[in-house]
Image (cartoon, rainbow, N blue to C red):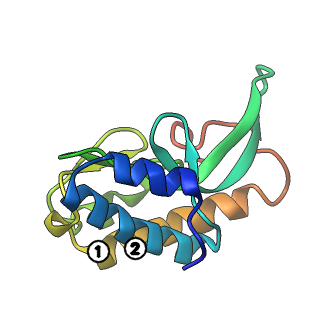
Amino acid sequence: MDKITTSVKDYLTSLNDEQTIKDSQVLLQIMQRISGHSPSLLNEGTIGFDSYHYKYHSGREGDALIIGFHPKKGKTTIYLMDGTARYSELLTKLGRHTTTGYCVYMKRLSDIELPVLEQILQQSYGYIKSESQEGPIDHILWQTEK
C-alpha cells in the first residue's frame, strides 16, 4: 500500500475507536487497490480515491470522488457515486447494511461479506471511469440511468 497522507492518518487516529480504525484500514487497502490511487481526506472525514469532473447543464461544475468512505464509530458510510440501485442484486448478498441513493451504511465490516463489497466497488469504479473518459459527466450519476 502506498504511503497514506498524514491528514488521513491523523484523522483515523482521531477516531479513538479501535474497531473503526481497523475497519478503515481494510477499506483503505481495498479502495486503493481498486483505484490505484492514494487516499485523500475530503470534507470532514470523507476519505476518497480518485476523482471525476462533472459539468451539468445548469452550469454547476466540479470534481467528485469516484469511490470512498466516511468512518464513524458504529456507522461507516461507503459512497457509490453511481448509486446503490445499480447494485441491488449484489447488495442482497452483502450482509447487514442499509442504503440511500448513493450510500451504503454498515456498523462494522464483520457484518458484511467483503468479497461482495469489493465486487460492488470494482464495478462502480469501472463504470464511473468509463463514463468520465469522454470528458465531464453531464448528469448526476446516482439519480439518472443512461
Percent across and percent down for residue 14 are 35, 46
Mark 1 falls on what kind of element? helix
The image shows residue 70, relative to residue 2, as above or below, that is above
Inspect this view and state whether residue 86 appears: yes
Residue behind mark 1: 114
Which residue occupies 51% across, 42% down? Answer: 142
Q: Quadrant of residue 134?
A: bottom right
Q: Name the foreground residue: 137 vs 104.
A: 104
Q: Are marks 2 and 1 in contact (CB under 8 Å)?
A: yes
Which residue occupies 25% across, 56% down? Answer: 20
Which residue occupies 61% across, 63% down? Answer: 127
Percent across and percent down for residue 2 are 60, 76
The image shows residue 131, relative to residue 145, as above or below, that is below
Mark 2 falls on what kind of element? helix
Apparent side of residue 107 relative to residue 25 in the rendered image (left or right)? left
Percent across and percent down for residue 19 are 20, 61
Q: Which mark is residue 118?
A: 2
Apparent side of residue 110 relative to residue 5 in the rendered image (left or right)? left
Which residue lies most toward the right here?
135
Q: Residues within 10 Å of mark 1 (few under 14, many from 20)?
A: some
Q: Which mark is residue 134?
A: none
